[in-house]
Image (spheres, rainbow, N blue to C red):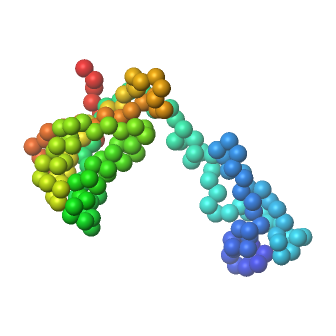
Amino acid sequence: MCPHIPSHPFSWRCLRAWKIVVSHKFPIALKINCLQDPSVHYDHPPKRLLLPQKMARDSAPKPDLVTRDYTIHLSKRVHKQQFKKRAPRAVKEIKKFAEQAMGTKDVRIDTRLNKYVWSTGVKNPPTRVRVRLSRKRNEDEEADEKLYTLAQLVEVSSFKGLQTENVESA
């Protein structure tokens, strides 16, 4: 219970009484004295304190080389864009999606995929695109990233019922 407002378990004044220290990716809440009354200590942490279990979930090692097929809905990503900026924005959004899905900063777009996006002109990129994202090792020794993502076009007759699929490399 908060001493400032007895009916509530938390108040903003209590939040100022806690100092959150991030050390080795694990936040630790330290109890410090309240600025208004130095004799008062609070015995509950802030609500938004991250727990170590939630952070440990993302730190699992990903397999190095993997290939997956994704469907990217381009029309929702270029919605309310200027006409002359739609196709360039679609290419940027494909790169952003690949960066997020594969976890690499270096994303390379295949020429067939680029031509498919630009095939209907700058004003009207395709509504959806099926993309094969492959995480590969960088051959260049002085490269910043040791992995890169290659985005390739997958030709499909219909986008109905398609889901993300892992592709077995043959």
Horizontal and vertical percent for residue 147? Answer: 42, 30
**Is 167 on the left-hand or right-hand side of 160?**
right
Q: Nearer the viewer, residue 77 or 53?
A: 77
Rendering coords of residue 141 (x, y %): 46, 22
Residue at x 78%, y 56% (from the top left corner): 30
| Furthest residue in direction right, as rendered | 39
Please identify the residue farthest to the left as the structure is shown.
Answer: 157
Q: Residue at (27%, 49%) from the top-left corner?
A: 91
Q: Nearer the viewer, residue 125 or 65?
A: 125
- Left or right: residue 148 compared with residue 83: right
**113, above or below 48, in the image:** above
Image-based side of 70 in relation to 33, left or right: left
User: Residue at (69%, 50%) from the top-left corner?
Assistant: 22
Q: Would you identify the image quadrant in which residue 38 lies?
A: bottom right
Count of numbered marks: 0
Q: Is residue 47 above or below residue 149?
A: below
| Above or below, 55 relative to 10 | above
In percent of width and height, residue 14 lies at 74, 70
For the C terminus, give its image quadrant: top left
Q: Nearer the viewer, residue 53 or 166?
A: 166
Which of the pair 4/13 is nearer the observer? 13
Query: Where on the picture, by quarter, is residue 140?
Result: top left
Judged left or right of residue 156, residue 10 is: right
Query: Can residue 165 be seen by looking at this rendering?
Result: no
At horizontal 37% and vertical 28% (from top left) the residue drawn is 136
- Quadrant of the drawing holding the N terminus: bottom right
Residue 107 visible in the shown view: yes
